[in-house]
Amino acid sequence: MGDQYVKEEFRRHRDATPQQALVFLNEWTQYCTMLAKQLSTSGIAKGVLGRQLSPEMLDGFADEQLHQLLELKMESEGLGEDGEQQKKQ
């Protein structure tokens, strides 16, 4: 995942309340732990990376969160905002 996306995600939460910051950091910690496990030798062999979000979870997201999720998907796939493959520099 791109460093720029991660930096922007943390900047978006700069003014979060302590309770919001705790939830945000907890989610990122869980995400990092999950990726570390999946990127272990056994995880790579299974070809599994990330997890599917349930329709119920997606229904609970605000429009801004859905947009951020789309940005994350595009960043992880190396796509620009126009959906075109980004050239690696």
Image (cartoon, rainbow, N blue to C red):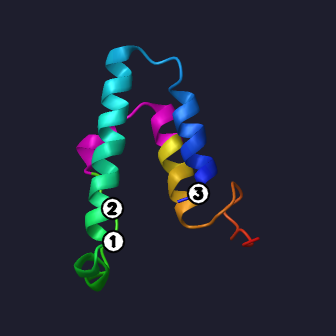
Q: Nearer the viewer, residue 61 or 14?
A: 14
**Residue name at image x 59 percent, y 48 percent:** 5
Residue appearing at x 36%, y 15% in the figure: 18
The residue wearing badge 2 is 35
Name the one closer to the observer, 45 or 70: 45
- Residue 43 image offset from top left, x and y in percent: 26, 76
Q: Identify the mark at residue 39; answer none if there is no mark.
A: 1
Q: Identify which residue is drawn at 27% across, 58% down.
A: 34
Residue at (31% x, 29% y) in the render: 23
**Region of the chain picked out in magenta, as a range:** 54-67
Q: Nearer the viewer, residue 67 or 34?
A: 34
Residue 58 in view in this figure: no
The answer to whether marks 2 and 1 mark residues whose Cβ atoms lie closer than 8 Å is: yes
Type of residue at label 2? Leu
Tell me the chief SS of the magenta region: helix
| Residue 76 x/y as whole percent | 53, 62
